[in-house]
Image (cartoon, rainbow, N blue to C red):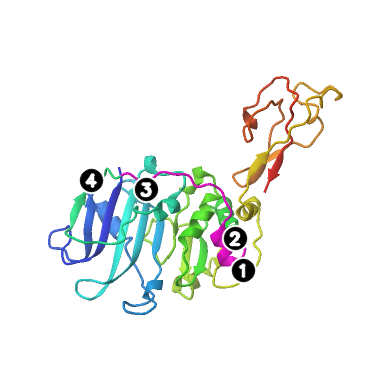
């Protein structure tokens, strides 16, 4: 079941007698404490006031946060943005929140879902109303690829790998990304998440315009506006990763994920030897083919690490299925190469 709530300034809200900033749309049966918790995520700080020529550069908050709702840890997706002037001609904002059940989470990850068209509500019209919880979310996969948005913005796609590796090494340590108005942060987050195993993408919480979050709410990757109090505060966390997109960064350094971010490749290739290649080979042990006896074990990338692949007799299995190979005689041998 998907729970959602929309919060903005309106002449009348769902709650009797409410007006101004209030909830105008909610899922049927949402408990009051859950509604209150979601409303607390609706804060927004505009950079430019309504009518300013640069108001269109006001950042949009796209976030995936972990928080306790109804006695359990939940995934909350949010979009909070400047919304011009309200019915009373005062500054307005619009905040849409989704509580996503674990069964409805696409393997592509939370940033992919936030970027998908028609998932997050961007406007409000009409009367306050209740919606059912039967809404269906899109499902999809996010494949490893060259992190082109990072390359365009920093000159080196490898910085996406630096961010992804920081989570794998220190998942409890926040990472900071410093940005300027007009930068689109969501594609950067989505590319970095795509470098992680699908099983870990929903473990990462983030905000593309971080100001503050309520107590007990987790936010791992925090995009902070340059020269803001949050950007200045981030300098105090000397153990945390801090990527400043407003300054020249130079080449990124790190492990396998940095190179994968640059090349988009992280797979194993196979090369076949002639059918009679084994006829002149010396006898091998029962657990080694002639070509692997005494040689260094092949490796593959797993969760950003190079991991030895156990020796075994192999046959003609498709690329990437070596672990399914079993005993048996074969004149076709694999040569393993990591393509990075």
Spatial separation of the CA atoms under disc 2 and disc 3: 29 Å
Residue 131 at what x, y percent from top left? 22, 49
Q: Which label is found at residue 249?
A: 1
Question: In this picture, which residue range is highlighted in magenta?
Answer: 136-156
Name the residue nearer the viewer: 217 or 100: 100
Spatial separation of the CA atoms under disc 2 and disc 1: 9 Å
Spatial separation of the CA atoms under disc 4 and disc 3: 19 Å
- Disc 4: which residue: 132
- Disc 2: which residue: 159
Spatial separation of the CA atoms under disc 3 and disc 1: 35 Å
Q: Which label is found at residue 170?
A: none
Quarter containing the N terminus: top left
Helix, strand or loop at mark 2: helix
Q: Nearer the viewer, mark 4 or mark 3?
A: 4
Q: Which label is found at residue 74?
A: 3
Residue 171 at what x, y percent from top left? 53, 52
């Amino acid at each position: 079941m998907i729970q959602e709530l929309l919060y903005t300034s309106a002449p009348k809200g769902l709650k009797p007698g409410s007006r101004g900033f209030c909830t105008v749309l909610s899922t049927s049966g949402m408990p009051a404490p859950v509604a209150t918790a979601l409303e607390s995520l609706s804060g927004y700080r505009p950079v430019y006031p309504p009518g300013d020529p640069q108001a269109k550069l006001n950042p949009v908050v796209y976030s995936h946060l972990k928080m306790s709702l109804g006695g359990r840890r939940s995934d909350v997706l949010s979009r909070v943005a400047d919304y011009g002037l309200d019915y009373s001609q005062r500054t307005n904002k619009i905040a849409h929140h989704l509580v996503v059940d674990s069964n409805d989470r696409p393997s592509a990850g939370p940033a992919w879902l936030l970027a998908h068209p028609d998932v997050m509500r961007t406007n409000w019209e009409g009367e306050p109303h209740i919606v059912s919880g039967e809404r269906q979310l899109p499902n999809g996969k996010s494949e490893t690829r060259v992190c082109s948005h990072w390359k365009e913005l920093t000159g080196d796609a490898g910085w996406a790998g630096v961010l992804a590796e920081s989570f794998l090494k220190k998942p409890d340590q926040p990472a900071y990304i410093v940005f300027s108005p007009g930068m689109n942060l969501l594609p950067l987050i989505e590319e970095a998440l795509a470098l992680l195993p699908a099983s870990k993408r929903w473990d990462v919480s983030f905000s593309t315009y971080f100001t503050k979050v309520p107590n007990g709410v987790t936010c791992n990757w925090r995009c902070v506006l340059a020269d803001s109090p949050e950007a200045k505060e981030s300098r105090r966390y000397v153990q945390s990763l801090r990527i400043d997109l407003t300054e020249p960064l130079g080449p990124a350094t790190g492990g396998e994920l940095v190179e994968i971010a640059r090349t988009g490749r992280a797979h194993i290739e196979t090369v076949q030897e002639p059918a009679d290649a084994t006829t002149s080979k010396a006898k091998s042990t029962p657990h080694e083919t002639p070509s692997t006896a005494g040689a260094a074990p092949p490796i593959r990338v797993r969760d950003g690490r190079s991991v030895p692949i156990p020796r075994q007799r192999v046959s003609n299995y498709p690329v990437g299925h070596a672990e399914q190979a079993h005993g048996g005689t074969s004149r076709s041998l694999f040569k393993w190469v990591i393509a990075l």
